[in-house]
Amino acid sequence: MRQRNRLAIAAVLTCTAALTAGCGGAATDEPSAALEGRGPITYVAGKDEEGVNPKIVEAWNQAHPDEQVRFIELSSSADDQRQQMVQNAQTKSDAFTVLDLDNVWTTEFAANRWITELPRDRFGLEKFVPTTVETSVYRDRLYGVPTTSDGAMLYFRQDLLAKAGAKPPATWDEMRQTCEKVLALPEAAGMSCFAGQFEKYEGLTVNFSEAVHGAGGAVTDPEGKPHVNTPEAKRGLDALVEGFRSGMIPRDAITFKETETRRAFMDGKVVFTRAWPNQYSHAAKTDGSSGVAGKFDVAPLPGVAGPGVSSLGGHSLAISAFAKNKATAVDFIKFATAPEQQRLRLDQGSLAPTLGEIYDDPAMQAKYPYLPLLKKSIEGAEPRPRVIKYGEATDVIQENAYAALRGEKSSDQALADLQARLQELTGQQ
């Protein structure tokens, strides 16, 4: 079901005239024809807290004095990043060359011809984890090269579980039972059970999607139609709603984004958290900033009806359709997604690689023991709906899921309203 769903989304959620006037085929039949020109370019990405991108740009610039790259750092907010890139495209500005796109933006940017088709034979795609490449494809054409991926993991207090004689849970029911044991310990006084990302932003779309998929449902069905008004989706949403109602999820988690989730775990306020791999390096720090260093471990996400399913995160590098010096941009993308740069992103930012060889490298596994688990999470992950109007789709998902979590709507009403709005946005009844 999950694999068919993933392939169906890639194949079926394509543009129609009713969705956008910019829809259509690729701008050229031969991608190489549009990839000419050498000289200075820009590289545009969101705020880089770890300082990795400037180092990659510096390494490139030292080796290419006549084809310098200028790094343009945008906001830390994904919504703001997308808006600035969309504005640049709508004005047909050549200010942005290489775009660091969240993988859910690929469909929108490709359908509107804001990014340029790329040749499949230039980037060694066979070396990438297949699910990461799927997110860069639109209508069977390549529009980006995956530079980072993301698969969620369950972070847990290994020390407390060991003391309670418990193992990492495989389901939500098991997590609830484990928390009852752990929270009865004197060492767990004042702690709560579980936290994720439940503020009304993109993280809620991710967490909602994982709850639905982990309950055997899907945000879209195998034909690419919205499919959220189902018993399975209700079971997934109800698990979150009941989590807040029962106190399994602390009340203040309704305001949590990634940073707040990480802080709660590192400060010893929760036993379990759902988080991306970049939480690992923060939690493991021994400089006094983390209260759980040496006390935690990671496991697969638990699901409502069985094993959990991560939403597929990550970014790809694309080329603006309005940029100059696209031949240089192609070479820079190859450089920025090479093994050396992916190892740098992993070492300095705990950013998940997209190349399979890094996950399978024994030396890297010794350094990062969670890599095999992370690879499985990414291989089994489900993409968020790849629709042209993704910005509007994620807004309505957040609006209705948030209303259910706050008790402003029943889960039945929230899912019925969400189904209707997604059908309007996608044109899929």
Image: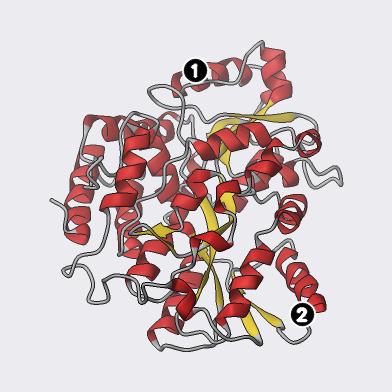
In this figure, which residue is indicated by the disc labeled 1? 174
- In percent of width and height, residue 420 lies at 16, 52
Closer to the N terminus: mark 2 or mark 1?
2
Residue at the image point whose x is 68% and y is 39% from the top: 359
Q: Residues within 10 Å of mark 1 (few under 14, many from 20)?
A: some
**Disc 2 on helix, strand or loop?**
loop
The image quarter containing residue 394 is bottom left
Residue at the image point whose x is 72% and y is 83% from the top: 68
- Is residue 241 shown to the viewer in this render? no
Q: How is the image coloured?
A: secondary structure
The image quarter containing residue 39 is bottom right
In this figure, which residue is indicated by the disc labeled 2? 64
Indicate the amino acid at tag 1: Glu
* Relative to 32, 282 lies left or right: right
- In percent of width and height, residue 413 lies at 19, 43
Near-viewer residue (265 or 229): 229
- In percent of width and height, residue 426 lies at 21, 58
Label 2 vs label 1: CA separation?
55 Å
**Disc 1 on helix, strand or loop?**
helix
